[in-house]
Image: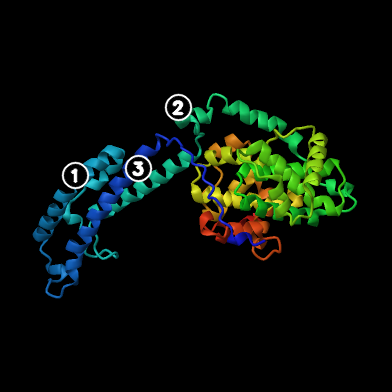
Amino acid sequence: MDASKENYPTLIWPSNFRESPRMEGAKFVKEVGHNLRQALSGIDQNVFGATLNSHIPNKADFDRKFAGQTVQHWLGELSETKKLASLALNPNSLEDCIIIDVEEYDDDASDGGVPMFVKHTEAMLDEVDRMEEDEMEDEEDLVIDIDSSDLKDPLAVVEYIDDIIAYYRKTEKSSCVSSNYMALQFDINEKMRAILIDWLIEVHYKFQLMGETLFLTVNLVDRFLERQTVPRKKLQLVGVTAMLLACKYEEVAVPMVEDLVLISDQAYSREEVLDMERLMVNTLQFDFSVPTPYVFMRRFLKAAKSDKKLEILSFFIIELCLVEYQMLKFPPSLLAAAAIYTAKCSLYFPPIKQWSKTSEWYSNYSEDQLLECSKLMVTFHQKAESGKLNAVHRKYSSWKFDYAAKVEPARFLLNV
């Protein structure tokens, strides 16, 4: 089955975030700095550009009265800009910037004779840039209330969301499986599980199912295999039945049993699928309400103030982890946080801080706690295209997923 020919839906999880009030000052200062730079560009052209012409006298013969008139002309154009700057900056910091004595024009200066007022104005621009950087750093140190913009949205359940996430945290351990449960199986191994999950990812998008359905399907497969030994020829039947149960739990329109039989090349009959369904629900004791990485991804992406590109790349990375048996040792919340952190490192190269105080607060994971898992994700990203099991890579190499698989891995994390 060639998954690359299928039309997959674009995953969009829009999020609204509150902009910190502290950023208003930085934006205003940035505009002032822009105006000053434009004014300086004019000074360069009219004052110093003239020295390049051959008909202008030597510096020794330069008429200081004429120079004073030229400078005063430009001061008139800069007066309004300076007034704006005085509102945004400390008046003491501008005191030196208003010195305009033409006598300070240094003919013997090594920098080509730049007037003092230009030097002081450039120093002020440097201060503007420094203040803007400080504002950005302060904003990163703040913990932002990511739910404040959704107070009027009943679907956001702002009143209960903290309790819901806390419950997910409490119960996520019960939804995890042992990282070495394959030792109990006599006829299947880790590689066979990887082949099954890779195939299920293709089937999932052929039927255009919801994202929650895929993560629940993989969870049901692992939990069932941990408790029940399965012969090799029945492994695909387990996967098909797990997807059927996940569809009944998550989807509005559930695929027919006959469709699942057909997609498995009629290797099993309808009766066999129903018999496996009964065995699976009894083995799992009808417990399908478990937190998967998907529910944490939605919450942590909101805390990370994500855009569409970051969301898609984060899901590409975490779907790569579904195929990998060794990633079962990490809880779902850690997988979600590490996937977002790795995606940010891939898109936005350091030294920009990729894990803010807000993300740390809502995920309960520091950057150091994510590194081990994140390094493994980088290795999966590196081999995604060349590996034999590349259903995820083919899927995210399409324009509908913004060619997320083409993004370069964050290789520098391997050296951290």
Mark 3 or mark 2: whose residue is earlier in sequence: 3
Q: Left or right of 347: which side holds 219? A: right
Name the one closer to the observer, 73 or 32.
32
Relative image position of residue 51 (x, y in whole percent): 18, 69
Mark 1 or mark 2: whose residue is earlier in sequence: 1
Determine the residue positioned at 15% across, 68% down. 60
- Tell me where residue 249 sits by quadrant: top right
Which residue in the structure is indicated by mark 3?
A: 27
Q: Left or right of 24: which side holds 398? A: right
Which residue in the structure is indicated by mark 2?
A: 152
Residue 351 in sight in this render: yes
Relative image position of residue 126 (x, y in whole percent): 35, 50
Amino acid type shown at disc 2: Lys
Q: In the image, is residue 85 above or below residue 42? A: above
Mark-to-mark CA distance, 3 and 1: 18 Å
Relative image position of residue 378 (x, y in whole percent): 65, 56
Determine the residue positioned at 35% across, 42% down. 27
- Tell me where residue 379 sits by quadrant: bottom right
Q: In the image, is residue 45 above or below residue 218? A: below
Quarter holding the C terminus is bottom right
Quarter holding the N terminus is bottom right
Relative image position of residue 302 (x, y in whole percent): 53, 39
Mark-to-mark CA distance, 1 and 2: 43 Å
Amino acid type shown at disc 3: Lys
